[in-house]
Image (cartoon, grey):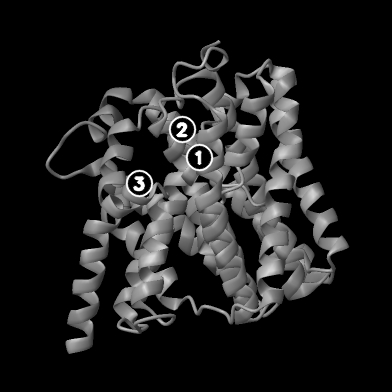
Amino acid sequence: MENSLLAIILIAVGILFVPFLSRVLRIPVSVGEILYGVVIGKSLLNLVHHSQWLNFLSTFGFLLLMFIAGLEVKLKEIASLPLKTRLLYTVIPVLVFTVAFAGTHWLKLNALTAIAIGAISVGIVVSVLREKGLLSTRYGKTVFLVGIVGEVISIALLTLFSLYTEFGFSSGFWLGLLKLGVYLLVARILLVFLKSIVWWFPNKFKFFFEKNPSEIGVRISLAVMFMLSVAASLINLEPIIGAFISGVIFATVFEETENIEEKLSGISFGFLIPIFFIYVGINFKMPHLSLHLLQLLGVLVALSFTAKILPSLLLKLEGFTLRESVGAGALLSAPLTLVIVTAELGTKLKVIDHHTENLLILLAIVTGILAPVLFNLLVKGEGSESSNS
């Protein structure tokens, strides 16, 4: 009982004070939360241990994180872009993974490491762009949309890798793809059905997203998230995929979801998601820092930045400067959440050991610190001339 109380107190202290310390240290809050977990967890003080309640809250926070990431995917906004721009936003992430796979093949590392190197996530991207006042500019929207397409491709590759690892190219793999196809079809039907109802009864559904004591909008969003997460689990897909897809569906059906996002973000980023990141740090076991490990970590960090920056030079075709193009690639090099997802999935599938998992988490932490710093050095704030063009 005393250990549980101590864990609650330490996590509450972390949730409260880490954002202030992160601002002083000029690192992303999520990175600060992981580092705090490292301090109180297995690697250093060993004050907090694995527990069911902590595992549940961490998993819940993780699902909410992926759901909110799905909410950021504005399919209508992407579909309204010119064909040339949409192709460019797709080509860049594809080239990122091409460079990542080529680099890891040359280093004789496995495919999961290549996915971790090429993974793109918009969590830190949105945070940094918002802090610099660039999120609403043409440049900010471009980096964000490239990140969104990259995140979708990253999750698709993780899903395919998971199926291939379990079944190879046997009938189980194709059955898994068929189940995924049926799952997406059912999700699509659900989307069309909900959209039709919203179209026929706009006033009633508008009520759900306004302020009301029963918080119907929040209940609907969480119900959709849990249902699709459970459905994904039932067909042997990762629940996070269901959470991500449910966020995409929700944002597509209900276009005016700012009020819901605000409410979910409050409890999610203010409580549950920090617990997830702190718990990652708690379970992180610092590998022995040999010269070989540090050299390998340095190579992986360099490859991660190279894989993102080289393809991002294509943004010059959209009229951005060289510094802005390189800055975009640098910022996309901090896929903190998806690298951690990849590492945890690899351990679960037994394609990597805990030593490699911890190495990948170290990679996530290092790139999560370096990427925003490099971006801030390269790209100005809202006053940048071409950013607002």
Q: Quadrant of residue 237?
A: bottom right
Q: Secondary structure at mark 1?
A: helix
User: Which quarter of the rendered picture does the C terminus lie within?
Assistant: top right
Q: Secondary structure at mark 2?
A: helix
Note whether 338 is above or below 166 in the view shown.
above
Which sits earlier in the primary sequence, circle 3 or circle 2? 2
Res 148 visible? yes
* Residue 121 pos. (x, y %): 56, 47
Q: On the rendered structure, is 361 left or right of 321? A: left
Amino acid type at mark 3: Ser
Q: Mark 3, mark 2: which one is toward the viewer?
A: 2
Q: State the residue in front, 131 or 266.
A: 131
Which residue in the rendered view is the most extreme toward the front?
Answer: 291
The answer to whether mark 3 and mark 2 are in CB contact below 8 A is no
Q: On the rendered structure, is 78 left or right of 114? A: left
Res 190 visible? no
The residue shown at (28%, 49%) is 219
Amino acid type at mark 1: Val
Pointer 1 residue: 125
Say few, some or many: other residues with alpha carbon within 10 Å of mark 2 (under 14 / 14 to 19 / 20 or more): many
Amino acid type at mark 2: Leu
* Residue 36 pos. (x, y %): 35, 67
Say few, some or many: other residues with alpha carbon within 10 Å of mark 1 (under 14 / 14 to 19 / 20 or more): many
Which residue in the rendered view is the most extreme toward the left?
Answer: 213
Pointer 3 residue: 221
Q: Secondary structure at mark 3?
A: helix
User: Which quarter of the rendered picture does the N terminus lie within?
Assistant: bottom left
* Residue 148 pos. (x, y %): 58, 38
The answer to whether mark 1 and mark 3 are in CB contact below 8 A is no
Pointer 2 residue: 129
